[in-house]
Image (spheres, rainbow, N blue to C red):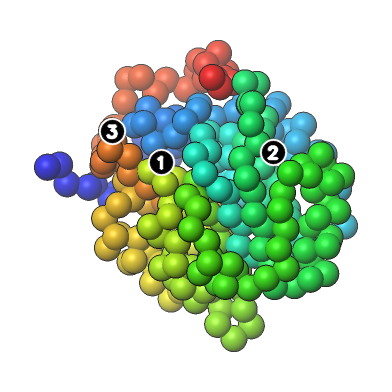
Amino acid sequence: MATLDRTPIWNCNWIKDMSFFHLIQATLILLYDNGCLGYLPPNFATFESWYDRINQTYVDRTSITPAMALLLFSLGFTHKPRGLVVICGCYQGLAMNFILAGLIAKTAHKDFPRVVALDIDGAAIERAHANSQSLGLSFVEFFHDDARSWCAKNSESISLLYLDLDDPYRGKADYVTIFNLVRSEISPGGLLLAHDSESPVFTKDLDALKTLIVQSQVFSHINSFPVDQAGLLVAIKSTSADPLLRCPRSLPNHLNLSPVSQRLPHAE
Ligand SMILES: C[S@@+](CC[C@H](N)C(=O)[O-])C[C@H]1O[C@@H](n2cnc3c(N)ncnc32)[C@H](O)[C@@H]1O
């Protein structure tokens, strides 16, 4: 059996000289070509139109930067949901709405996945609900609940899990608690996204999560994307067709960036 090469994609030489947008695209195209993602990433205009809409909806700013918004939108766009989308720590829904906008922005999009958004802060949930309504994303189910309790009760397959809980005392320690609760529910090809993977404040908690993900041996791709100071950890559950992803050492011939705009969008 092949061994898993854990070289982070962002450390590969071929990716260093490209612009930021192309960096995200190149990474996602590579993952797509390895069978890890359902669709090729979106073109910039698709993102931009949603970026303006979402930005105009929000009253309070959060730590979600434009770079993170682009990454979340692109991951939503490339993901083919096969189960629940679960957002742990939605606050007013900013990160969530970029993921959902990406999910539904595909031209051939037909069904909304079941989306569950959780936050322990009731006022934040109310605001998130209002924001979703304004954006026409009213299919989201909001729960004013502790994400740990909700996840402990859930038995449905999870296609995309987004973690962004922080607690004044526990920091991001709940990432590990929730991963342990739902790890077997995450479906093959499922995405696990964890915010703040680059933040020095949360290194201990994120390292504990990464260790568990690696030890589980069922994720084919585990990388932290340093798109801003917070960063995003992306792990993709292996499918039987693609048990392990190997990161190439040099630019693969088929990853020619110039025709990217001709290849996109590429939804079924
Ligand atoms: C950094 S904020 C999330 C920001 C959000 N993702 C966004 O897009 O702006 C962290 C959120 O986690 C929530 N939280 C903390 N512990 C929680 C728990 N155990 N269950 C549910 N929500 C929790 C907080 O109420 C807070 O709204």
Label 3 and label 2: CA atoms lie apart by 28 Å
Amino acid residing under circle 2: Ala
Amino acid residing under circle 1: Gly
Which residue position holds label 1?
189
Front-most of residues 49 and 153: 153
Q: Quadrant of the N terminus?
A: top left
Which badge, 3 or 2, is on the more N-terminal residue?
2
Label 2 and label 1: CA atoms lie apart by 20 Å
Q: Secondary structure at mark 3?
A: loop
Left/right placement of residue 80 relative to residue 114 reads left
Q: Residue drawn 28% across and 33% down?
A: 241
Q: Quadrant of residue 87?
A: bottom right
In front of the other: label 2 or label 1?
A: 1
In front of the other: label 3 or label 2?
A: 3
Which residue position holds label 3?
241
Left/right placement of residue 84 relative to residue 53 reads left
Q: Residue drawn 46% across and 73% down?
A: 177
Which badge, 2 or 1, is on the more N-terminal residue?
2
Location of residue 207 in the rendering, given as x and y in whole percent from the top left corner: 39, 69
